[in-house]
Image: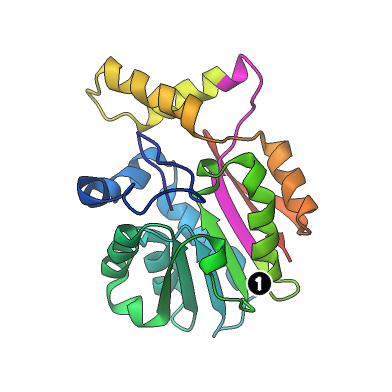
Amino acid sequence: MQIDDHPSPPASRRTASAFTGDAVKSYLKGPPRQVPGFSSLHRMAAMLMAERMPDNGRVLVLGAGGGLELKAFAEARAGWTFDGVDPSADMLQLAREVAGEHSSRIGFHQGGIDAAPEGPFDAAVCLLTFHHVPVEQRLEILLQIRRRLRAGAPFVVAHMSFPQTEPERSLWIDRHIAYGAPDGTDPFRQENARKAVRERLHILAPDEEEAMLRTAGFSDVSLFYAAFSFRGWVTYA
């Protein structure tokens, strides 16, 4: 999971040093502040996966650095096991610490989707990560996820997605920055954050997101989460 006022490099190319030191220490404060309904997103994702998963199911978590979703899913379902994948060793270490007593049910893998076990998995989830991945790399990642899933297994994905035509694009970027800005944030920092979203994130319109999921071979694509600049879908292998 990656989201920050100063967005990181894409998940597929991010160096191990991108989330280190103070950036790692402060990471856990960001998502609950920036993402509307953050804890509810985790709860909904677990519920959607549970609809088609066995009690002892195995879940692939792409972009697992920080461990917040791993902890939430592990607390929700005592019988599930997890494989969490993230490019940053420091963020994976943070995930181990956050997961705490649940770490014995989690395998931690440093790298991109190629570092993930082959499966087969009973479900996969990727939260707040894909807007860091260049559009031209996403289809291959989705194909790799689908290949690791059992037939009919759910895939839950959520990240930033809003219209990319003007003036809607600029309006949604402004809304995103305004929502995530703590009281008293100075205009200079807000402008830097706005510039980072414009120049460093890779955001598609919702209809483009759904089309790419279908191109990757997923079926029954359904929107389950819409909160300001974020959208989430459940779909099936």
Task: Tell me the kind of residue under disc 1.
Answer: Arg
For the point 26% across and 68% down, the residue is 97
For the point 35% across and 46% down, the residue is 32
Q: How many marks?
A: 1
- Pinpoint residue 122: horizontal percent, then vertical percent: 62, 76
Which of these two is toward me, 80 or 97? 97
Which residue does the numbered mark 1 point to in the structure image?
148
- Pinpoint residue 42: horizontal percent, then vertical percent: 47, 58
Residue 228: within the magenta?
no
Question: In the drawing, does residue 82 fall left or right of residue 48?
Answer: left
Asked if residue 61 is positioned above or below residue 189 in the image, the reply reads below
Which of these two is toward me, 158 or 83? 83
- Pinpoint residue 64: horizontal percent, then vertical percent: 43, 61
Which of these two is toward me, 86 or 186? 86
Find residue 90 and report its image quarter.
bottom left
- Look at the image and tell me whether residue 223 can be seen: no
For the point 44% across and 46% down, the residue is 37
Q: How is the image coloured?
A: rainbow
Asked if residue 48 is positioned above or below residue 139 in the image, the reply reads below
Question: In the drawing, does residue 98 fall left or right of residue 206?
Answer: left
Asked if residue 197 is positioned above or below residue 111 in the image, the reply reads above
- Look at the image and tell me whether residue 48 can be seen: yes
Q: Quadrant of the C terminus?
A: bottom right
Q: Secondary structure at mark 1?
A: loop
- Pinpoint residue 87: horizontal percent, then vertical percent: 42, 58
Which of these two is toward me, 132 or 43? 132
Q: Residues within 10 Å of mark 1 (few under 14, many from 20)?
A: many
Q: Which residues are magenta?
A: 155-169
For the point 64% across and 27% down, the residue is 163
Find residue 50 and report its image quarter.
bottom right
Residue 163: within the magenta?
yes
